[in-house]
Amino acid sequence: MSRRISSFFLIGEILLWLLIFGVPVLGFFSGFFWKIFLGIFWGCLVWARFFEPKIIRVRTQKISVSLPKFRLAVISDLHVGPLKKRKFVARLVEKLNRSGADAVLIPGDFVWGDAVKFSPELVPFQNLKIPAFATLGNHDHFAEKKSDPDQSAIVENFLKKFGVRVLRNSAEKLGKIWIAGTDDNYSHFHDLLETFKKIPVGAPVILLAHSPSIADEISPALTVSGHTHGGQIRVPILGAIPFVIPTKNGKKLEKGWYAARRIFVSGGVGEVGLGMRFLNFPEITILENVPLKKS
Ligand SMILES: [Fe+2]
């Protein structure tokens, strides 16, 4: 793990554990209403750190785009690392095998931290019984910051070894549909001309790109992205907390299906930072296309 990520992780962990142990102590010395408030806060904290990130939800999202009928699973932002290990990946793979999907699309961010140390945690992908198409994310390129050495080749090689098809500005066919994948567009490694080079004009295409900002550059029949983690911590009605989504579009493309822009943004299955999720379960989404009727 790079020095920066390990110190950031350590400080975060210390603060979190101070809160987890400190809040009940504060509650002991507080008045009745403070006790209730601190109790709820503590419960949410413990749930968000120790329970919700482990619960994998499978949800079907019906969409209507001008592509042939399909049933495709989407997962994103696994972030294997100090928090997510191969046990979690094995549960994901098991659920994907039982999902009845034709294939799974994974728009990047496989690791959080040192690729050499953590990529082997992706080994359960070798038990996946459906084809997997992936692009890389910003965390797959760098350990944490731009001056760290590019580690994308390490992640790519492990994924290929485990049977995942890695698309880096390239495309492959899945039945009648082309799956086009850009390299990480958050850090500008993407090349759309190269990505679409071998796809015949007018052919059915699904575009995979890590950051949903790709929707500002191109809008094919369907785009699948991740990167946002849905904000990780969500609140009722508001969804993601303002200003935490790390893209230009921010909350405009935070999580879910945006029919007008024909883009699906996965809330992901992994975490970075404090490793918490609230009202935002790790999710396998089954995109089910009910094709548009031609008039
Ligand atoms: Fe991510």
Image: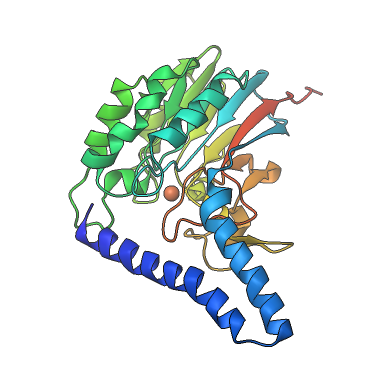
Quadrant that contains the C terminus: top right
Q: From where the camera sits, is residue 148 visible?
A: yes
Q: Nearer the viewer, residue 79 or 249?
A: 79
Colour scheme in use = rainbow
132 horizontally vs 219: left or right: left
Q: Nearer the viewer, residue 211 or 10?
A: 10
Residue 199, given in percent of the width and then of the height, sits at: 45, 21
Q: Residue 162, located in which quarter of the rendered image?
A: top left
Residue 28, given in percent of the width and then of the height, sits at: 60, 81
Up-down relation of residue 98 to residue 145 (above or below):
above
| Residue drawn at point x = 40 percent, y = 25 percent | 124
| Residue drawn at point x = 56 percent, y = 46 percent | 267
Residue 81, given in percent of the width and then of the height, sits at: 34, 46
Up-down relation of residue 250 to residue 167 (above or below):
below
| Residue lying at the far top of the rendered structure | 175
Q: Residue 16, located in which quarter of the rendered image?
A: bottom left
Task: Please give the count of numbered marks on the rendered protein.
Answer: 0
34 horizontally vs 88: left or right: right
Q: Nearer the viewer, residue 120 or 64?
A: 120
30 horizontally vs 159: left or right: right
Residue 69, given in percent of the width and then of the height, sits at: 68, 18
Q: From where the camera sits, is residue 232 visible?
A: no
| Residue lying at the far right of the rendered structure | 295
